[in-house]
Amino acid sequence: MAYKTTPETLSDAQRQFYRDNGFVHIPGIISPEEAAEFHDAIQDFSEGVRPNEGRDLMVRDQPVFTQLVNFWPENDAIRRLTFHPNVGAVAEELAGVPLRLWHDHVLIKQPHNETPTTFHQDQPFWPHDNSPQSISAWIALCDVPVERGCMSFIPGSHRHTDLPAQSTRDANILFTAQPDLTWATRITVPLRAGDCTFHHSRCAHMATPNNTDQPRVAHVVIFMDCTTTYSGKRHIVTDPLNLEIGALLDGNLFPPVRDFATRIKGS
Ligand code: SIN
Ligand code: NI
């Protein structure tokens, strides 16, 4: 299938924008038809799911968003999206290093949720060492105008490497930790279905509330360097795995992008 953006059509300007700013808007990472198919698969699946019902899948339902973590082992359609060859290939081009899956998560902002996702960096939440280039693909599965909960980024904030974890429900916490970001430029990126933004794991970002009648459905695929090791920090994905501190994060749950084509077919 021909996509608007592929590793071959990615421009030098897009690569440079990502390096300078820590995020980039990529039109058409998947087709609008694929976005509609994945959107419907998520709607069918998520309606029957209740938080903490003891599945492998981890579900958190909050005003900020309904979050389904590690959705790919549960659902064939989402497995195809998480291991989508174009998404992984463009992520590796932008990161400039070999990557593997960290985890995926579906993020639904329910209609009229009235709650933003406040500014934060992702990396401080993760139990990772040796992962300087980790990167997320935030894929819009419906049109996401500003009114439905699109993302905003602080260009260049990925260079702040020593900040503590910042809650997604406290609008001041990033700026208390790093006051010089208070007056920094913010860039807001509405997306059409099938577009995505890639952001570096330390690029500060937020999402507006959903003020529309339709849910905002996004699928986020998070990639980490193939060199990533376990730091011992608590995290819902790694807590059940009994890992040794310093262990390479590899194995079945964390396949490298180069194996994605085979992983689409089964876990
Ligand atoms: C959101 O979609 O509401 C936030 C996504 C993120 O923090 O990566
Ligand atoms: Ni985030």
Image (cartoon, rainbow, N blue to C red):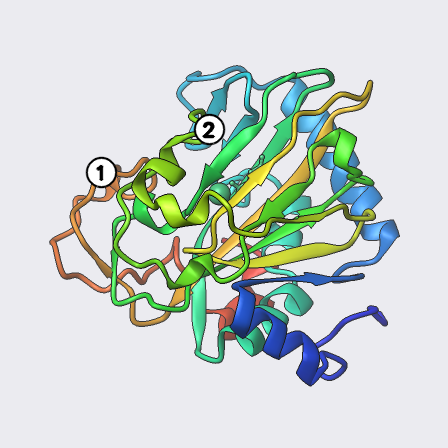
| Residue 98 percent location from the top left of the image | 44, 77
Which residue type carries mark 1? Arg
Q: Residue at x 41, y 47 (%)?
A: 122
Taking depth in this image into account, of 51 and 259 the one nearest to the observer is 51
Residue 72, percent from left and from top: 55, 45
- Is residue 209 shown above or below 142? above
Q: Which residue is mark 1?
A: 234
Residue 208 vs 162, above or below: the answer is above
**Does 187 sit left or right of 236 as displayed?**
right
Q: What is the quadrant of residue 240 in the picture? A: top left
Left or right: where 87 falls relative to 26: left
Q: Quick check: can you spot residue 92?
A: yes
On the image, the x and y values in percent for residue 5 come to 77, 71
Q: What is the C-alpha distance between the residues marked 2 and 1?
A: 24 Å
Determine the secondary structure under disc 1: loop
**Three-letter amino acid code of the residue under disc 2:** Ala
**Is the residue marked by circle 1 packed among few (<14), some (14-19), or many (20+) residues within 10 Å?**
few
- What's the mark number on residue 171? 2
Total count of labels: 2
Q: What label sits on residue 91 in the rendered view?
A: none
The N terminus lies in which quarter of the figure?
bottom right
